[in-house]
Every structure is written in structure tokens, then in C-alpha cells.
Amino acid sequence: MGRSQETFSKKDKEKNKIKKRQDKQLKKEERKANSKGGGLENMMAYIDENGNITDTPMDPKAKITVDAESIDINIPKRTDEPEETVRKGKVTHFNESKGYGFIRDLETQESIFVHINGVSGTIAENDMVTFEKMRGQKGWNAVNVKLAK
């Protein structure tokens, strides 16, 4: 005759499953007994004027109306600053093999990108140059760069 297929661990696992099911059912019944009711009004949450979540609705008299037309969600338009035609600066960095560098504007002290295509002649680091500023895709570029006399 063959041995029983039920072992001690199988019996123990089955007992644990039944106990968990009973505990779950008991907790469910407790929640039902202690709940206020499942109405919509008990589930509502409101936001007060400070952005905090509350369970009481806001006073309609304290409500602030905002004109939707006055809200601007666009990026502000770029205002082009008035440009002088020729500026003076000093070459702070220039890499001839890569063909680009930077010029420090003497007036505003900002660093402006310069590409080899915008240079007439040759320039090197620490040279004083004259140039024109032109808006590029990523910011200001120096064009018509020449050695200052």
C-alpha cells in the first residue's frame, strides 16, 4: 500500500491559508461595522485657499475669482537689446584646430562665442579685437571679428 500524499508541511500550509482567509474576513467585517457609510459626501476632499486638503468645503463668500484671460502661460517674448554696431573685446580662448573660441566683451564683460567662419584674418588668445554681436540658435555669436588697431 502507498504512503499518504499529505505531509506535515502541506497540512501546515493549508492551515495557515485558512487562518489568513478567516483573519481577512474578520477585518473586512470590522471595517464595515466601524465605517460612517460609503456615501459620496464622506469621500469628498476639498482644497482650501492655502492648498491644504480638508474635509470641509470652502466658504463661497471667500472664493476668489480669477480672470482666465489674464493668465499668461507662454514664454515671454525676447526683447532685443539695442546694439552698437562695433564692439571691442579680448580673445580669452581660441582653438584653431577646432575652429572656435570665446571673446570677452570689454563693455559688458560677457563671454561671446566666436566661430572661425566669423573671423576675417587670424586671431589668437589675448588679442584685442573688434566684432559685431549677432543672435544665434544657442546665444550670442561674434561675427565680423577683426584685430583691433
Image: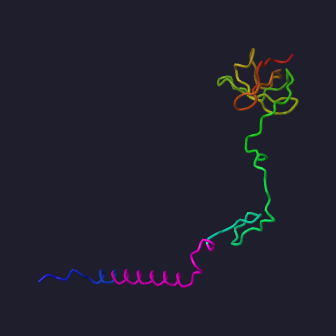
- Quarter of the image where the N terminus is located: bottom left
* Display colour scheme: rainbow
Q: Would residue 9 appear left or right of 34 to someone viewing this image? A: left
The relative height of residue 24 versus residue 92 in the rendered view (above or below) is below
Classified by dominant secondary structure, the portion drawn in magenta counts as helix
Q: Residue at x 54, y 85 (%)?
A: 33
**Image spot of residue 95 (x, y percent):** 69, 26
The furthest residue to the left: 1
Q: Say if the magenta span includes residue 23.
A: yes
Q: Quadrant of residue 64?
A: bottom right
**Image spot of residue 112 (x, y percent):** 77, 30
The relative height of residue 89 versus residue 14 in the rendered view (above or below) is above
Q: Residue at x 52, y 82 (%)?
A: 32
Q: Residue at x 80, y 17 (%)?
A: 146
Q: Would residue 93 appear left or right of 130 to someone viewing this image? A: left
**Image spot of residue 18 (x, y percent):** 37, 82
Q: Say if the magenta span includes residue 71.
A: no
Q: Would residue 115 appear left or right of 15 to someone viewing this image? A: right
Q: Residue at x 76, y 21 (%)?
A: 143
- Residue extent of the magenta highlight: 14-42
The relative height of residue 139 versus residue 63 in the rendered view (above or below) is above
